[in-house]
Image (cartoon, grey):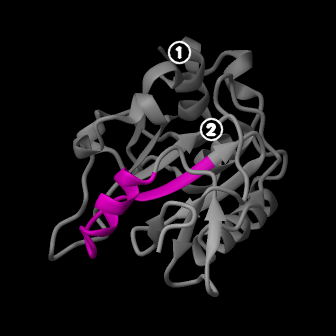
Amino acid sequence: MLATATSTSAMQGGFSDVPTEAARQFRAIMNAIARPGRIETLDGATPPAPMSVAAGVMVLTLCDPDTGLHLAGDHDTPDIRAWVQFHTGAPIVPAEDADFVIGRWDALAPLTAYAIGTPEYPDRSATLIVEMDELSSTGATLTGPGIKDTARLSLPETEAFQRNALLFPLGLDFFFCADTRLASLPRTTKVTERGAS
């Protein structure tokens, strides 16, 4: 395993200037969290396929040896495991132990597999990084903290996010990634179908 993790391919694709890049990307991620539905651009990383640039940047910026990461579906590959291990040291863990989860929407099911926090510690919940083919400011309507009036985001569905919002202050937080594009959907955000009241 160590040989795989220190192979040439695993060593490539990280930040060229870690402190500077991590700080810059962290600001973009925080902007996305503060304004749900707003699309930010992340760059500076080249993770192994099929992980998107945006998801790879999130891993490099937010994960460390104390951050459990679960790789779902076709994202659980030897190349991605080795890349994550080399650049962040984050352990790859089962779904129920994950701080962060990466995968395509279908591969992330069931959402009940992930920690939603406890009444005493609602922050002890998982954040899901959903890989998408496209990401745009169209589709579902978002309302809530950080949104003036409404925002729109091309979500894979709406019902799951409506159920998640009902769990507040518990629940999951979501990021959506497509190529270099990133948007967030915190548990505080209410989701309705386009045109629904």
Estimate how packed mark 1 is, as few (under 14), some (14 to 19) or many (20 or more) residues with alpha carbons within 10 Å. some
Magenta span contains residue 150: no
Residue at the image position 59 percent from the left and 50 percent from the top: 176
- Disc 2 target residue: 132
In terms of depth relative to the viewer, which is nearer, 126 or 68? 126
The kind of residue tagged 2 is: Met
Which residue is labeled 1 in the image? 78
Measured as percent of width and height from the top left, residue 183 is found at: 64, 59
Question: Regarding mark 2 in the picture, which secondary structure is present there?
Answer: loop
Image location (x, y in percent) of residue 33? 58, 71
> How many numbered tags mark residues here?
2
Magenta-drawn segment: 158-176
Which residue is at a point 39% across and 68% down the rendered structure image?
187
Mark 1 or 2, nearer chain start: 1
- In this rendering, the answer to whether 62 lies above or below 14 is below
Report the front residue among 195 and 170: 195
